[in-house]
Image (cartoon, rainbow, N blue to C red):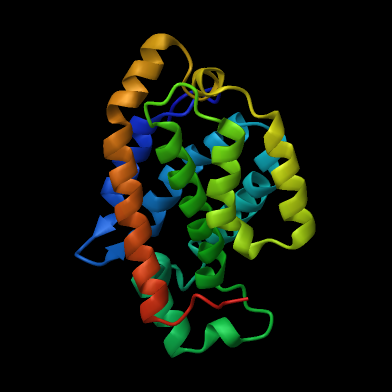
Amino acid sequence: MSNEDTLDLIYVNECFKKSLKDDDDVIIEDYIDGYNELVKFLNLIGSVFSFVSSDVKSKIKVMEKLRSEEDSIYYESYKKMMKYEKESNLYEKKGFVSGSRTMLRLHRGLDFIRLFLKRLSEENENLDTCATCQNSYNETLAEFHPWYIKKAAILAMYALPSKQDLMKKIFGSEDKLSEALAILPQTLQSCDEVYQRVQQLYTDFDFHGLP
C-alpha cells in the first residue's frame, strides 16, 4: 500500500490484474484492495467527491462483514455471490444486506473514476478539468444520483485546479508523476477489463436494476 497522500497506480494495476478469475469472473478481495487505493483519487481531487468516497467506504465495510460471516464462501467472487443471491432470492429478502446491491454502487463509481482518469491522461495540457470532470460525471454516476446531489457536485467541480496542478496533487513529485503516466495505460486497461466483466455479470444475472 502506498502513502495516503498520493495515488499508487502500480498497486491498483496489480490488484485488478490479480482479481481477474477464469474468463468471466472477478475476485472480490483483490477488487476491493485495488478500489481502496482508487478511492484516494476521489479524496485527492477535492471535497467535491467526498460524498462518493464516504459512500464507497461504507459499502466496503458491508462487504468485509459479509466476507467474515458463515456463508463467506459465497462472497469470494462476483459470479459466486450473484449466483448465490439469485438462486436463494436473498437479494429480495427484507432486511438482508445484498452483496450484489452493495457492489453495484462500487461498480458505478469505477465507471466514473476510469473515465475521468482516462481523459485527464490525454496530452492536452490546457484541458479544462472542470468541464472534463462534469462530462465524465454526467455520463456515468449522475444517472444514479438525485438532482440535489447532481447540482451540488456539478457546482463544486468549478473549484477544480488546472490539469497540471491536479496531476501533481494526485501523483506527487515530477518523478512520481512520470512513473504514474508510464503505468497509467496498463492500469486503465486493467480497470476497463474488470469493469466490463462486472458489467456483463450484472447483465447476465439481471441485477442492474437493484434499488
Say which quadrant the N terminus sits in: top left
57 above or below 143? above
* Residue drawn at the location 51% of the way across and 63% of the way down: 103
- Outermost residue on the top side: it is 174
Residue 65 position within the rendered picture, expressed as x and y whole percent measured from the top left: 56, 60
* Residue in the picture at 41% in, 29% down: 8
Q: Position of residue 28 (x, y in %)?
A: 40, 58
Q: Which residue lies furthest to the left in this view?
A: 23
- Left or right of 155? Residue 75 is left
In this picture, is 111 found above or below 184?
below
The x, y position of residue 45, in whole percent, is 60, 31
Most extreme residue toward the right is 148
Residue 77 at least partly seen: no
Q: Which residue is drawn at 50% across and 71% down?
A: 100
Please tell me which residue lies in front, 174 or 63.
174
The front one of 14 and 138 is: 138
Q: Whole-percent x and y of residue 169?
A: 55, 20
- The foreground one among 55 and 181 is 181
